[in-house]
């Protein structure tokens, strides 16, 4: 079985797969002070609840955008699963795509993994929108190569910045409002954040399509907030919550056969 780990700026997602069959998926906040031992105490309990024997795990792969957390995650694989994990972005790990960027080494591992997974599942040139700490728009060409993208502040980051910078504004939940015009401070903030973000998403997708000359270019949305925004716009062709994990499985399978 394979242990796949996606370490983002906000959360770390652990998943166990037996071939293509998911056996368990769990997430925790990404605290760079958390040690391999602490990860294992937490993870062991969840694996036990799902009836997963850690002795059956014979491979691991990690994608991390947080360098400070990577050491502890690699140590977790060494110490408790007795395996050498593949780390996306490290020398010798084959992705099977070209990174068509001026500085390929600067592209986040999660964005490359998403590109690989999206091309495998949907095949044609497309846009991947990932709702994370940042909201990213990534372009995958017809050959599956990573062809560039856009990085915008994530909606939670925007919401927190508004609360921190304006002393009289409260912290509010993200939710769609029935009307754009708010009649009180809280619904006005919720409208501005939610519908403003919908405008950002739609505007960037339309501009990307126009720049590439493909006004019908498919859009795949992933990340925890993707379903919420899918209800507010018609521009998403696919909602794929496990896109990153699927990409990790593909990369591990590719490198295992080399």
Image: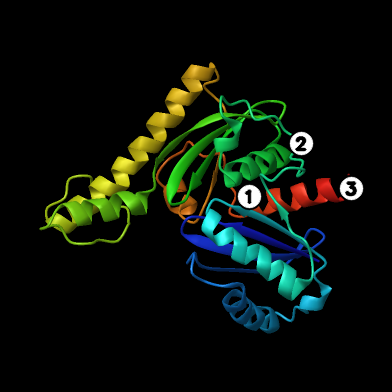
Q: Residue at x 82, y 50 (%)?
A: 253
Q: Dot 2 lies on which element?
A: loop
Crowd band around label 1 with a 10 angstrom C-alpha radius: few (<14), some (14–19), many (20+): many
Is residue 121 visible from the viewing direction of this image?
A: yes
Q: Residue at x 79, y 58 (%)?
A: 20
Q: Answer above or below: position of 91 versus 212.
A: below
Q: Give the image location of residue 173, x and y in percent.
A: 29, 61
- Viewer-nearest residue: 29 or 226: 29
Q: Give the image location of residue 154, x and y in percent.
A: 39, 48
Q: Is residue 173 left or right of residue 143?
A: left
Image depth: mark 2 or mark 1 in front: 2
Q: Answer above or below: position of 210 versus 52.
A: above
Give whichever of discs 3 and 1 has the lower sequence position: 1
Please state the total of marks drawn on the protein image. 3
Q: Dot 1 lies on which element?
A: helix
Q: Distance between the Cα atoms at labels 3 and 2?
A: 12 Å
- Viewer-nearest residue: 180 or 120: 120
Which label sits on residue 257? 3
Say how the picture is coloured.
Answer: rainbow
Picture quarter with the C terminus = top right
Q: What residue sits right under mark 1 in the picture?
A: 243
Q: Give the image location of residue 6, x and y in percent.
A: 61, 57
Crowd band around label 2 with a 10 angstrom C-alpha radius: few (<14), some (14–19), many (20+): few
Q: Dot 3 lies on which element?
A: loop
From this viewpoint, which residue is outermost toward the top? 213
Q: What residue sits right under mark 2 in the picture?
A: 96
Q: Residue at x 40, y 34 (%)?
A: 202
């Amino acid at each position: 079985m394979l242990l796949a780990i996606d370490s983002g700026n906000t959360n770390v997602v652990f998943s166990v797969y037996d071939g293509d069959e998911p056996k368990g998926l769990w997430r925790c906040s990404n605290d760079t002070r958390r040690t391999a031992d602490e990860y294992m105490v937490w993870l062991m309990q969840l694996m036990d609840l799902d009836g997963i024997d850690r002795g059956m795990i014979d491979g691991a792969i990690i994608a991390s955008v947080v360098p400070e957390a990577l050491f502890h995650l690699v140590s977790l694989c060494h110490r408790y699963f007795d395996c050498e994990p593949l780390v996306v972005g490290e020398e010798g790990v084959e992705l099977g795509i070209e990174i068509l960027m001026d500085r390929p080494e600067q592209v986040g591992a999660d964005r490359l993994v998403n590109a690989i997974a999206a091309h495998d599942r949907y095949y044609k040139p497309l846009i991947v929108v990932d709702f994370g700490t940042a909201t990213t728009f990534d372009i995958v060409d017809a050959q599956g190569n990573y062809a560039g993208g856009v990085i915008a502040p994530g909606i939670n980051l925007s919401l927190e910045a508004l609360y921190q910078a304006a002393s009289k504004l409260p912290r509010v939940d993200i939710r769609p409002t029935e009307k754009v015009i708010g009649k009180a401070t809280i619904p006005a903030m919720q409208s501005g954040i939610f519908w403003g973000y919908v405008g950002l998403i739609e505007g960037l997708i339309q501009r990307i399509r126009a720049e590439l000359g493909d006004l019908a270019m498919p859009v795949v949305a992933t990340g925890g907030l993707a379903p919420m925004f899918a209800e507010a716009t018609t521009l998403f062709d696919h909602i794929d919550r496990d896109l990153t994990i699927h990409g990790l499985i593909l990369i591990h399978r590719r490198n295992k056969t080399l």
